[in-house]
Image (tube, grey):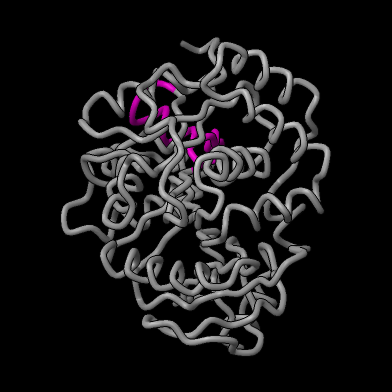
Amino acid sequence: MSGEPWSRLPRGLATRQPSGQLWAVVLAGGEGIRLRPLIRHVYGDERPKQYAALLGDRSLLRQTLDRVALLIPPERTVVVAMSGHLRYLAAELDLHGSKPTVLVQPEDRGTAAAILLGAHWIHARDASATLAMFPSDHLVRAEGAFMDHVQAVAGFVAGREDWTVLLGARPHEPEPEYGWIELGARVAETPRGPVHEVRRFEEKPAPAVARLLHEAGALWNTFVFVSRAAAVIEAGRQRVPALEERLRRAVAFADTEHEHWALQQAYALASRANFSHTLLSAWPLPLGVSPLPATDWCDLGSVERVLRTARRMPVAPPWVSTLDAATCVAGQNA
């Protein structure tokens, strides 16, 4: 399986869909290096964190897919994964009936490639599609309220072709390890609250700067966003034109005998690009942010953060009592 760039796993509908639908893109290609010491301790292997059930009996990927399914059905959900992860992904999806489409990247070219690949694949089937993008390593407690918010933002975006709107979490502490969003002018009101222009981003600020941002009412960047697929592609065309063109040409061969070759060629010489740094920080189209209600959102990006979250659970996972200080330090220093 690992040799295939497009997944052999059951893929969703490979035909054109009714116009203007809401789709989901779930990013599942990360390696989770900072959590590797904890994963090794719990599982005895180095599986990426999205395939690990650290907090409860579901993996982070399965939690994400179940959360997305509250609003968007599996046939309109696209998981973008890596070829080296297929054994974990296959085991995850084999446990469930309805399965999303799986697009497997042959190499890691950064989050820009992953998101643009998903956007192109969706756009080829629904040229008027709105997409919601979800990382697969987040914890969300109030999942229904969270997806209601996504739906409200999608309604705003569907009527404005050029807008992309991020979901911003209200911070309860001046966390310097998160990305922050400063709010600009209020531009609209949705059934779940306002949409503001993004004034600027601040990625992992110094502690003193994080305190100032917290006091000023800035939001944590969840990296969940809603956009028209065409707008994501246009931003890619303007910011990373060579990468965007490669992926556009590759997706044209999807579901043909040449798809394996096309995606291999697209990724073989493509440059690596981080979506946040290369595209989002200089987004060429209108960009907004919508403050979430208190949904208890958390990015499980470090051993210390996972451990802190686990200890707050009514019943802590069994691995918590067996974790030693060296594992925590290794995760923080990775």
Q: Could you say which is closer to the camera, residue 12 or residue 47?
A: 12
Q: In the image, what residue occupies the spot 29% across and 50% down?
A: 69
The quadrant of the rendering that contains the C terminus is top right
Q: In the image, what residue occupies the spot 27% across and 38% down?
A: 319
From the top left corner, tell me how far across and down residue 172 is, in percent: 44, 77
Q: Confirm whether residue 330 shows in the render.
A: no
From the top left corner, tell me how far across and down residue 68 is, in percent: 34, 52
Q: Confirm whether residue 210 shows in the render.
A: yes
Span shown in magenta: 27-45
Q: Please identify the residue farthest to the left as the structure is shown.
A: 315
Q: In the image, what residue occupies the spot 57% across and 59% down?
A: 228
**Residue 31 in magenta?**
yes
From the top left corner, tell me how far across and down residue 11 is, in percent: 39, 27
Q: Could you say which is closer to the camera, residue 5 or residue 2?
A: 5
Residue 321, located in which quarter of the rendered image? top left
Q: Could you say which is closer to the camera, residue 3 or residue 30?
A: 3
Residue 281, located in which quarter of the rendered image? bottom right
Is 33 placed above or below 119 here? above
Residue 309, located in which quarter of the rendered image? bottom left
- In this image, 111 relative to 313: left or right? right
Is 181 placed above or below 120 here? below
**Residue 246 in magenta?**
no
Q: In the image, what residue occupies the spot 58% across and 45% down?
A: 119
Q: Number of callouts in the render?
A: 0
- In this image, 137 relative to 223: left or right? left
From the top left corner, tell me how far across and down residue 255 is, in percent: 51, 21
Is 100 placed above or below 83 here? below
Q: Could you say which is closer to the camera, residue 163 or residue 81?
A: 163
